[in-house]
Image (spheres, grey):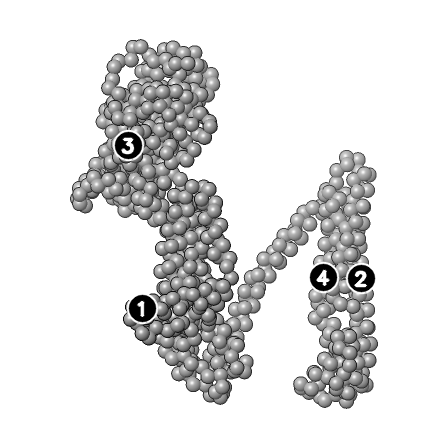
Amino acid sequence: MSPAILLVLALGLGLAGWLAARARAWTFRRDSATGRIAALPNYHGWYVALWIVIPVLLFIGLWSIIAPQLVTQSVLAAPAASDLPSFGFQRNAILSEARSVAIGNSSGVFNPAAAALVEPYRDALAKFNLIGVLATLIIAFLTGVWAFLRIKPDFTARTRVERAVMAILLFASLVAILTTLGIVVSLVFETIRFFGMVSPLDFLFGTHWGPDPMSNPDNPDPSRYGAIPLFWGTIYIGAIIAMIVAIPLGLMSAIYLTQYANPRLRAWIKPALEILAGVPTVVYGYFAALTVAPAIRDAALAVGITNASSESALAAGLVMGVMIIPFVSSMADDSIAAVPQAMRDGSLAMGATTSETIRRVLVPAALPGIVAGIMLAISRAIGETMIVVMAAGAAANLTGNPLEAMTTVTFQIVAMLTGEGSFDHPATLSAFALGFVLFMVTLGLNFVALRVVKRFREAYE
Amino acid sequence: MVTVVHPNMEKADAKMSARDVSVYYGDKKAIDDVSIDIPTKYVTAFIGPSGCGKSTFLRSLNRMNDTIPSARVEGEITLDGEDIYRSKMDVVQLRARVGMVFQKPNPFPKSIYENVAYGPKIHGLASGKAELDEVVEKSLRRAGLWAEVSDRLDDSGTALSGGQQQRLCIARAIAVDPEVILMDEPCSALDPIATAKIEELIDELNGSYAIVIVTHSMQQAARVSQRTAFFHLGKIVEYGRTSDIFTNPLEERTKDYITGRYG
């Protein structure tokens, strides 16, 4: 029996408990002199249902982890298992083959050694499934009855359900946080492994990037792992070129939308701008690679620059800038709109024009919010991958010429992880170190941005 | 119904005049056919129950209603005989001549100095830093704030107390040397001591500027103004010398309001 069926069973038992407890609570209500009980019958129902479902779910979770091991243990104890090779890969292969036949995922065995184990496997699975179901029923029954017996007219089921609801919500929010922590931990471990092979100093300050996944993994050449060109490419494309496009355009569109556009126009333009944020980045990538990059090359050739590359930092940066406009403009829009109307009125009443009011009062007052928006936009831009993969090229050039191909941290993460090197090769592991650095930088930017926004909100409350 | 104008009100030069002014918000008529002369160098108080249109009328005197898209003004309002709603009127110039102080103090989130220097800067009233310093000091002195802030002009204007903020806003309005100052319930957000200071200040400014003050407090109107107009349901019911309005109202509704029977 699979966990899915156990799950359905648990929910069914929960429903039964709910109905039973509710019916019992109704009788209290009918029998009591005042017709008042400490909680509505539904709360009593939920109380019992939660007491059934949550322990059972915990048990199922635990059982689905330990049951396979118990099954394997009992198969190994069978006489047919004595012929198995004692260690390693082959032993595991035979066991998993026997297992998949026993479950019914595959019809026959290749390895004759596995054939003998199919029958013990089948027996063990049946036995432990039965144990699982019985244990589920027993647990549900015990906790359900215990909860059911606690129901009395003066039992405060309502506040207890409230507490359970809070616990469930807390669990939901912890999932995201724990996932983030898990990401950090996994990155840290692989990064430490990488730094065991290549010194962090060579990595962070070296100016030549060219890991060779085919080289001897035990003796990497640290001079090929200098990430400065990648950092430079990332900053040049994401934080410089893209921002030269996104900051003025985003800010101006926000100002137009909040201060000049009439409501009907605003109702059209704002969603249209937000659509930009919803375009998949791979589509921007096409646009950058197929339209913008050739156009830039042709333009460069037309003005006499002969060595223009068909993949360029400029193309990737420009398109990325357009992609980022909605981020800048919606944050700027929000923070300009959050400046109290009284500021605007005060300035207009002094005889300032609308544009003077914007320049001298609204934008300075909204500046923290605008800066925070720009920081979030930068962290988004330097983490962006598809556009640079398609349009920026792969060459790790350390140059200030925007017409040359450049590469970024994200591009190299993709290149290294999808490359031909084995997983424990330093070239592959370098992807984790790059990811770790990128993660730290974007985390820092987001952290600062959120702090700034918080301070800004407080200023107007 | 026609506004009752007290007959014994001595003739005074009209700084601003409204003739048959109606103000609409969308289809709703907020001000209905109001005519009034605002005298030069006096304090005129607008009193009346909430929602009677006094603030709306005040805002139409420097065209601040323009900032509300649905607002529309009919009739004629003149400043020194010039129609302020004519198409060639420069709203920016008008507002420099007719300043405004709001209900809630609204200093800009800049330094005290920058708050006062804002108007002179945008209107080019001072050439050079020394002259600007002078304008700022003069305005703060006139607003009675100089002694309290002279040693911390670089602090943020929003860090001042409510009463100080409101005086800062008055200093800011004075700094562009207006001819008329409109005050929209300038003390309603302030405590009694801060209120007394603002009233003192209004007394001092009286004579240099035509001041129009909207107030909910009849005592305040009696204390600071020489002329009072009683607004009710978008009309001016009665207009005359403050002493006459409060001691000898001609209209039943005015009497009811000032004796506190409604409002």
Disc 2 and disc 4: Cα gap in Å? 12 Å
Q: Position of residue A270 (x, y in %)?
A: 46, 49
Disc 4 and disc 3: Cα gap in Å? 76 Å
Disc 1 and disc 3: Cα gap in Å? 51 Å
For label 4, the residue is A57
Name the front one of labels 3 and 2: 3
Q: Indicate the secondary structure of the residue bearing disc 3.
A: loop
Q: In the image, what residue type sits under mark 2?
A: Leu
Q: Position of residue A213 (x, y in %)?
A: 49, 83
Asked if labels 3 and 2 share a chain, the reply is no
Question: Is A199 placed left or right of B194 in the picture?
Answer: right
Number of the label disc, if any, that sits on residue B89: 3
Q: Position of residue B110 (x, y in %)?
A: 31, 45
Number of the label disc, if any, that sits on residue A137: 2
Say if mark 2 contacts mark 4, CB within 8 Å: no
Instruction: Choose the circle earlier in sequence order: 1 or 2.
Output: 2
Disc 4 and disc 1: Cα gap in Å? 69 Å
Name the front one of labels 4 and 3: 3
Identify the subunit bearing mark 4: A
Determine the residue positioned at 77% across, 50% down: A18
Asked if labels 4 and 3 share a chain, the reply is no
What number of labels is visible?
4
